[in-house]
Image (cartoon, grey):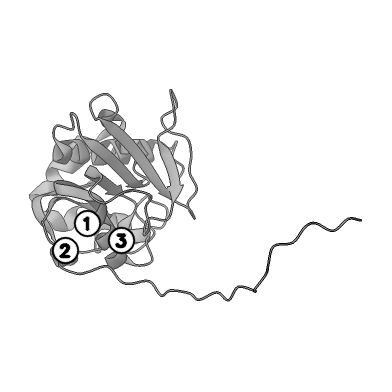
Amino acid sequence: MPITSPRWGVSRALVREQVVGLADDVSGKRVLGLGFATPYMRFTLDKAERVLAFMPARQGASAWPREGPSHTVLCDPLEMPLTDAAIDLTLAIHALEHVADAEELMRELWRITAPNGHLILIVPRRRGIWAQRDNTPFGSGSPYSGGQIDKLLRDHSFVPEAWRDGLFLPPFQSSLVLKSTRLFERVGRLFGPAMSGVICVRARKEAFPAVPRRKREERFVRLPGLSTATARQG
């Protein structure tokens, strides 16, 4: 779905509402957006101490915001160029469902998160209609159930504090659907989380890691024994 389509604009606005509500006050915080989080992060620019947007190398990076210096960085999400405990709040959107190793990503997120810092995850619901359609922003990657997300967070020393459901609007390019966005959202909530398209959760970092990071295999590279020499004259 093109990011300029009306449906994309509506879905982005609905998800942004959940992100802003979960983030609460970001004044003075160091905020990181991971994945394709920039469409949901503008509210952080004026209040946060520092704002970074990390985009996976295979996805490519675009300058953001349009005005002023760019905050985007192209990097490997499993080896982010940050010191330990550098971030107060991470917004991971279009990140977890696309990474090759979700557990390794969680270990890396724990490493970069400050003590009592927070992580906000937005992931497609496994049985949601948005995950079933390929032409939606949440129609690619690996969707999750609420139980899977809860276990993944707790297994990696993040305690869920708040849950929200989003995108009860069906992913149809129909003017009637788009004009009735709020009606669909209200009615959808009456039927419970199963009708939502995404799972939104805020979790707090615990002091000690439940699972240590994997030790990467060291590679031995044989170097030739060379002594210093002057350049040859031609």
Count of marks placed on residues: 3
Identity of the residue drawn at 30% across and 65% down: 104
Q: Secondary structure at mark 2?
A: loop
Identity of the residue drawn at 22% across and 49% down: 85
N-terminal of the two: label 3 or label 1? Answer: 3
Mark 3 vs mark 2: in front = 2
Between 137 and 46, the one lying in front of the other is 46
Number of other residues with Cα within 10 Å of mark 2, as a class: few under 14, some 14 to 19, many 20 or more: some
In the figure, residue 209 lies in which quadrant? bottom left
User: Which amino acid type is marked by label 3?
Assistant: Leu
Q: Which mark is residue 105?
A: 3
Number of other residues with Cα within 10 Å of mark 3, as a class: few under 14, some 14 to 19, many 20 or more: many
Q: Is residue 185 left or right of residue 42?
A: left
Instruction: Residue 2: give x, y in percent of width and height.
Output: 46, 42
Q: Is residue 107 left or right of residue 94?
A: left
Could one spot residue 124 in this view of the protein? no
Q: Secondary structure at mark 1?
A: helix
Q: Secondary structure at mark 3?
A: helix
Q: Say if mark 1 contacts mark 2, CB within 8 Å.
A: yes
Instruction: Residue 195: give x, y in percent of width and height.
Output: 18, 55
User: Which amino acid type is marked by label 1?
Assistant: Trp
Q: Is residue 163 left or right of residue 44?
A: left
Between 36 and 188, the one lying in front of the other is 36
Instruction: Residue 1: give x, y in percent of width and height.
Output: 44, 47
**Which residue bears the numbered disc 2?**
209
User: Which amino acid type is marked by label 2?
Assistant: Pro
**Which residue bears the numbered disc 1?**
110
N-terminal of the two: label 1 or label 2? Answer: 1
Number of other residues with Cα within 10 Å of mark 1, as a class: few under 14, some 14 to 19, many 20 or more: many
N-terminal of the two: label 3 or label 2? Answer: 3
Identity of the residue drawn at 30% across and 71% down: 214
Looking at the rendering, in which quadrant would you find the C terminus?
bottom right
